[in-house]
Image: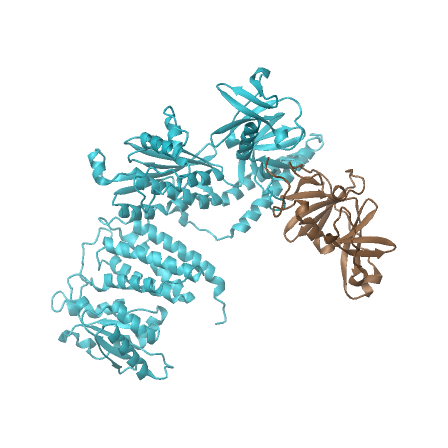
Amino acid sequence: MTEVVNMPTLRSDAAVRDGASSEYLTFRLGEEEYAIDILKVQEIRGYDAVTGIAHAPAFIKGVINLRGLIVPVVDLRIKFGVGLVEYTPFTVTIILNLGGRIVGMVVDAVSDVMALAHADVLPAPEFSSRLDTRYIHGLATYDDRMLIVVDIEKLMLAPEMALSDEGTSAGERP
Amino acid sequence: MAVDMSQFYQVFFEETAEHLENMERMLLDIDLARIDDEQMNAIFRAAHSIKGSAGTFGFQDLADVTHELETLLDRVRKHDLAMNADIVDASIEAGDLLRHLLAAHRGEGSADLPRTARVCVRLRALYLESPPKGDDKVGTAATHFAFDLPADCPDPAAVVANMCAEFCARGLTVTGPEVADGGGWHGRAAAGTDAGLLRDIVEFAAQAGSFRLIADEDDAGWGLFEQPPAPAGSDDGFGFFDDAPGVPAGDVDPGYGFFEPLNGSSAELPVLPAVRPAPPAGDERPTRPGRSSSAADASIRVGVDKVDQIINLVGELVITQAMLASASSTLDPVAFERLLNGVQQLERNTRDLQASVMSIRMLPISMVFSRFPRVVRDLSQKLGKQVRLVLEGESTELDRGLIERLADPLTHLVRNSLDHGIEGPDIREAAGKPREGTITLKAFHQSGHIVVEVIDDGAGLNRERILAKARERELPAGDNLSDQEVWSLIFEAGFSTAEAVTEVSGRGVGMDVVKRNITSMGGRIDIDSLPGSGTRMTVRLPLTLAILDGMSVGVGSDTYIVPLNHVVESLQPEPSMIKSVGGEQRLVQVRNEFLTVLPLSTAMGKDAGGSAGILVILESDGEKIALSVDELLGQHQVVIKSLEANYRKVPGISGATIMGDGHVGLILDVPFLVQSARHLLTVAA
């Protein structure tokens, strides 16, 4: 039931060379590749047994039982409108621990764990997309791939995610 | 000191609070007409333990107060003093003060020093001014006192001069103080001096705990003490005092050796006066408190979070076991006989484990009940009523979380019964009842619930007055309401029929809060009342907050849990029973009632699919609705988990649980559904 994916331990030598760096977990949503701070990641598991919740936005798939904890699961593919939304035995849920709050996040695939030098993360230009640039920490390139470095904590706890009671406008009482 | 004592403070606080509670309970139990020696010993031991540990941990004020209390109790238990209501009152007051001081040390508020002084003086007055019987002179006699200044005091003369100025300012007539032979100081206060005040002034400057009071007379017989008190209180005496600071010397046992022969002057010399005929079992052997203190068994202190963690883990184990069981159910019973046996045994063991772990959280309801003797005593004194409190079923166990939340509503009910229910003694007598009213608190288990009853034999509820009041407040109240319905009016907010607002109750806030508190615990409150004979309030609660009796219902592929305490009945409707209003909203006629039909799928934000398969009639706050679901799946106890810990409040859902197959099941918020159904109806109408 719990399918733990072995995390690749590939490292970027270029980044390690440079002193100030952080480790990131990268994952794919459709053709796009995202990176998040690995310290926010609690575990990675398969996608199963989600119980739907009433009056929730479409990207909140529901809640799962994570060893006795009730944890909400968000499908980032729906949220960002990228990739093909389908659930297969290979669909992966990243469990995040954001300052005591546990949240699950469905992505297409987990690709790498890599170190990125702070200097290599370039500020993103202003543009409009379904992912607000406020939540983008910066952009980085690695092996000619562009990585979107996301401030995942800020994103997940934002009012528009409707994951917490503070500042939630979704789900008014009928 | 090398050892950091602060790490033990918490233990000290808990233990002391426990001792205080025991002491108070025993004090309230005292029957003045028949003093039980064992009981007195137990009370004394409680005070003694508090004093001992307070001294050890350096809580001087606690130790000082308990010392006074202990001295008083010691004399009572040795029959030097006769127990009387004053002593009981003073001891209870001292207990309150100790609790207050304890709270101050915990960092809740600050210590009330004048109160401390007052209580100490009161206690001291009780044992000083009523000395061994047959001698009433000491209290009025001149007082001889002695003290030491700190060894490092730079200018003793100036300090003493200051002290004298203070004596004058407070109106004490004091001769001295002057240096005694042994290096201490001694002085003499005029007859009738307030010993507590004297002590307070002296201790301000003197070395802590060195103040000694020696009751004195100007008789020749006091030759022993005429010379400065150094011999009495010097070296060996000090070894003793240092352990228990704040000891006024004259009252420690050794002092007695001096006093008795002197006071009794010539007659029957050496024997301690047998003040009162000692009760039959007058021997002093230290016995256990003979009361039915079943809780005094061996126990360990464990943090609640640890217990909760164990409960969670066991919950996990149960789910894992259920998974194993369902996975192995398809196996060939012959080929896998041993495995299947093992799985079966695992199931049994898991059940047992779960049951015993859950019982850790259970505490006897005496934890709540134990406060009521005090509440009733104080209140009946204040109201001038005579009330006897009867406690039944104190050992009934319920969840710790419930215990804490039950205390307030129950206190309210008891106060209410005392204030409004029980009549004054004269009225009772005129009505042919005993002058003393009775309030009974009764707890027992009944079909998976715990029932707590508050019964009084007072006047009962007045139907007319409640109805009049209800109309005054423009509540819907016709004359044809049943008694039950009339009684439940008193749970409306702002409802009070008390003729006058008293300090105790009558402001009309309360019964609605009581009801709300109890409902929020998943419980119910009912009233039975008979004019002239009394009232019975029945509170029915689930055994625990963490577990809920639920009925699982299916809608489409989803499963929801309906809390069973809201379910009235379930039925399969005939098509003719369902009526439509305005085409959209549907009503169902069940016997003589029309109920709103709320399809669960609509309430959960899904498309209403199919016909109403089964209707579950739900009730909340007296309102009923019919919830339409596809199927009933079963009935089970579920462990309630918070949805808000990692997510947020969801309308219509009160929590979540983990089903046998590991899926999350959502628990319906019935009061919300009932309300929202009513809302829909008013919109439609």
On the image, the x and y values in percent for residue B50 come to 37, 60
| x 33%, y 45%: residue | B504
Q: From the viewer's perspective, tell me whether residue B424 is left or right of residue B578.
A: left
> Who is closer to the viewer here, B15 or B617?
B617
Quarter of the figure with residue B532: top left
- Residue at the location (45% across, 61% down)? B107
View extreme (top): residue: B576
Nearer the observer, B140 or B19: B140
Q: Nearer the viewer, residue B43 or A164?
A: A164
Which residue in the rendered view is the most extreme toward the right? A144
Q: Is residue B463 left or right of residue A124?
A: left
B433 is higher (above) or lower (below) than B62? above
Task: Find chain A in the image and tell me its colour.
Answer: brown
Q: Position of residue B603 (x, y in %)?
A: 61, 31
Identify which residue is drawn at 59% across, 28% down. B634
User: Is residue B99 shown to the viewer in this render?
Assistant: yes
